[in-house]
Amino acid sequence: MTSTLKLQALGRLRTAPGGQLDCQIDFSDGAGTSRTVAYVERQLPPGGVSAYLAARKNGARSFVLWADESRQARVAGLVTVSAGRKALFEVLGPQGESLGRITRDKAFSRGVRTRWTVSRPGASDAVGYKGRLIWWCVWWLCSPTLPFALISPLFNGGLAADIPRGPRRIKWRADGRIPLEFKSSGDTVHMNDPDLDWRLGAALAALIPSFDGWIGTPWDRRKD
């Protein structure tokens, strides 16, 4: 059975001792009901928000997943091991144990598309690429008309969601299977492998949207 993890913006920014919660992650096991399993908070470096925003320009990310809004229980966390064109992240459990690693190779560094690799202890690496080649071809063929598509929603009272975006769907493959899939509609991670730790999927659900391009509105880019 496929389970899903969906990143959701909070109805309002919630402030608790030590900082602000940015998003929540809802889990569904496919039975039709969902529940909130984690609250996402940026993990700020000593320099605070300005230092975080400066580091994220080079691909660094850091956040905590809390089990509750009052931060009583830590579910997992993500830290940057190395940044740049090849960024490496580690997902850690509440005791600091490694749950897995996520590698992001920027487009044109290991192929024309952004490459995401999920590594877990005792399992083959799962490799996925952002978008399908055919849809990227369509996107670039339409790029001469993109400025008009960007301006049109402004005159028609549209929102950012109306602006056309490049392909974002990712399918990970390992040993001839598809253990993971990210669907851009709703920022949802689908886990098709029952052996996958849902906390690793939750970290992916928060990490991938943080790399939305200039058209998107990454949840971790706010300046307060």
Image (spheres, helix red, strand yellow):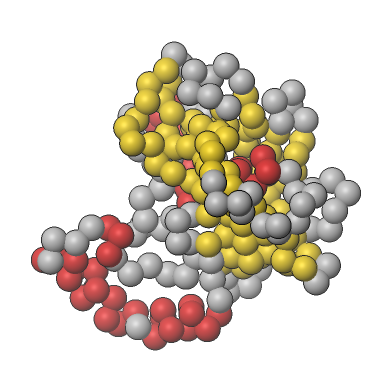
- Residue 151 appears at what percent x and percent y? 18, 68
Q: At 52% from the left edge and 36% from the top edge, which residue is drawn?
A: 36
**Residue at 13% from the left image edge and 61% from the top image edge:** 157
Residue 198 shown left or right of residue 46 in the figure: right
The residue sitting at the right extreme is 122
Coordinates of residue 44 in the picture (x, y in percent): 49, 27
Q: Residue at 32% across / 32% down in the picture?
A: 12
Q: Height in image: 211 above or below 107? A: above
Up the image or down, 84 lies above or below 139; here it is above
In the rendered image, is residue 44 in sight? yes
Quarter placement of the C terminus: top left
Q: Nearer the viewer, residue 128 or 80?
A: 128
Q: Nearer the viewer, residue 61 or 65?
A: 65
Residue 4 appears at what percent x and percent y? Answer: 59, 52
Q: Is residue 4 left or right of residue 143?
A: right
Taking the view exactly as shown, the residue that stands out farthest to the top is: 17
Comparing 144 with 24, the one in front is 24
The residue that appears at 71% across and 31% down in the rendered structure is 93
How far across and how far down the image is residue 213, in percent? 41, 58
Residue 54 can be seen, yes or no: no
Name the image quarter holding the N terminus: bottom right
Vertical placement of residue 148 versus 211, above or below: below
Q: Is residue 210 left or right of residue 215?
A: right
